[in-house]
Image (cartoon, rainbow, N blue to C red):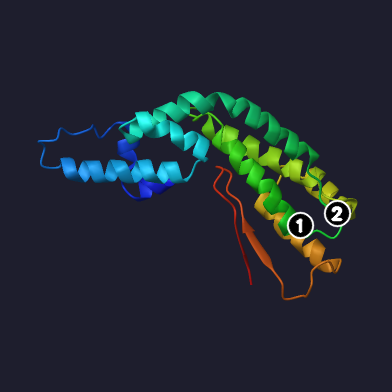
Amino acid sequence: MQSFLKGKGLWKYVTGDLKPLKKDDPKFDDWEINNNKILTWIANTVTPSISMQFGRFDTAKDVWDFMSRRYLQSNFARKYKLEQDLRSLRHQKGQFVSEFHSQMTIIWDELALMEPKWTTGAELWYNYREEMWLVQFLMALQDDFETIRATILHRSPLPTVESALSELFAEETRKGLLPNPSSVFVVTSHPRGNYSKGKST
């Protein structure tokens, strides 16, 4: 929602940087239209039991603040569940490495959103997180990849997830696990937590 509203140039309505206008202000109609657009978009993206509580609020900021106060406290429980899912996730027999990486990336991305906004030592943290993701991913692979997994884990410095994936895809192809030799899945991973992108060619 944040990305969507920023793309529409309306995020300041939610943060309160763009204050409500008085009815005699020439720009009031535009402000009211945009405010109600945001209220509608938010209401349409949450469950009815939540949106029914929005009736007592007049501005998008009020609704956003309400949801932050009410539901932010559940972040720890959500984080706990995600960490639990991550540790139980295992590469299944016959499952492509690309498919398994996508499953793990969904969890990584959501966990990354829960991290604090780093103001100092950010680069060190991102490098540490990249190494942590690499270890988590490699350890969850099936035993067919033990040889290449051991090779990657003993390198210094460790490669990025993206670099390791290239080698794993090659190993997958060598073992004949892909449906045909022309099937390639390209994956990019950024140490700063950007969403991974994949496309088949």
Q: Residue 171, image x and y in percent?
A: 81, 62
**Distance from Cα at disc 2 to Cα at disc 1:** 10 Å
Amino acid type at mark 2 = Phe
Q: Residue 105, image x and y in percent?
A: 65, 47
Quarter of the picture holding the C terminus? bottom right
Residue 145 badge: 2
Residue appearing at x 28%, y 45% in the figure: 34
Residue occupied by mark 1: 97
From the viewer's perspective, tell me whether residue 6 is left or right of residue 128: left
Label 2 close to label 1 by CB (< 8 Å): yes
Amino acid type at mark 1 = Val
Q: Judging from the image, what secondary structure is the residue with disc 1 in?
A: helix
Q: Quadrant of residue 65?
A: top left
Q: Judging from the image, what secondary structure is the residue with disc 2 in?
A: helix
The one nearer the camera, 181 or 30, is 30
Above or below, comparing residue 13 to residue 147 in the picture = above
Q: Is residue 2 visible?
A: no
From the viewer's perspective, tell me whether residue 72 is left or right of residue 78: left
Which of labels 2 and 1 is toward the front? 1
Q: Is residue 54 visible?
A: yes
The one nearer the camera, 117 or 34, is 34
**Disc on the earlier residue, 2 or 1:** 1
Residue appearing at x 30%, y 37% in the figure: 13
Residue appearing at x 86%, y 66% in the figure: 175
